[in-house]
Amino acid sequence: MKERMVGFLLMTAIVPLAVAGYLLLVGVGFFGRTSRGRAGVRALDHFVNATLFNGYAWESVSSHAWRMRERRWARVVIWCTDHFQKGHCQRANKREQPMVDLMLSKGLHKQTIF
């Protein structure tokens, strides 16, 4: 119960900041530096993976889709990304899997509050 309460309190602060960050990212996308926009999109990608797809916070949707490629949602993601860049998800997973393995070996996916 304590973890849920702390999580709720953190989210009341983080969600408005996330919305502000998204709006800033849109502006940066049109008028800002490409490197800053790329970093923001990467962070948003990891956020979406962790929240919507129940993935790891340090992994992109593409890498997660390749790892779970037998699932329907993953096949849709792979199909969509293949229209823009053939083999994108496989390359993303090859690049990110060592980081996932490291985080799992260090136990960073386990509960950290209380």
Image (cartoon, helix red, strand yellow):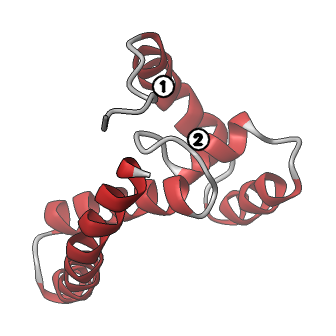
What's the distance in space between the residues labelled 2 and 1, CA to CA? 10 Å
Q: Quadrant of the C terminus?
A: top left
Q: Secondary structure at mark 2?
A: helix
> Of the residues tagged 2 and 1, which is closer to the observer?
1
Residue found 65% across the figure and 36% down from its top: 90
Residue found 17% across the figure and 84% down from its top: 24
Q: Do callouts 2 and 1 mark residues in contact (Cβ within 8 Å)?
A: yes
Q: Badge 1: few (under 14), some or many (20 or more) residues near its Cα, within 10 Å?
A: many
Inspect the image, locate mark 2, and give the three-letter code of the amino acid beneath it. Answer: Ser
Inspect the image, locate mark 1, and give the three-letter code of the amino acid beneath it. Answer: Val
Q: Badge 2: few (under 14), some or many (20 or more) residues near its Cα, within 10 Å?
A: many
**Residue that label 1 marks:** 100
Q: Position of residue 12 (x, y in %)?
A: 27, 76
Quarter of the rendering containing residue 13? bottom left
In the rendered image of this protein, does residue 24 appear above or below residue 107? below
Q: Is residue 37 left or right of residue 49?
A: left
Q: Position of residue 71 (x, y in %)?
A: 86, 48
Q: Is residue 39 left or right of residue 3?
A: left
Q: Is residue 18 left or right of residue 87?
A: left
Name which of mark 2 and mark 1 comes first in the sequence: 2
Q: How many marks?
A: 2
Q: Pick whichever, 54 or 25, lies toward us.
A: 54
**Residue that label 2 marks:** 63
Q: Position of residue 68 (x, y in %)?
A: 76, 39
Residue found 58% across the figure and 41% down from its top: 63
In the rendered image of this protein, does residue 63 appear above or below residue 18? above
Quarter of the rendering containing residue 111? top left
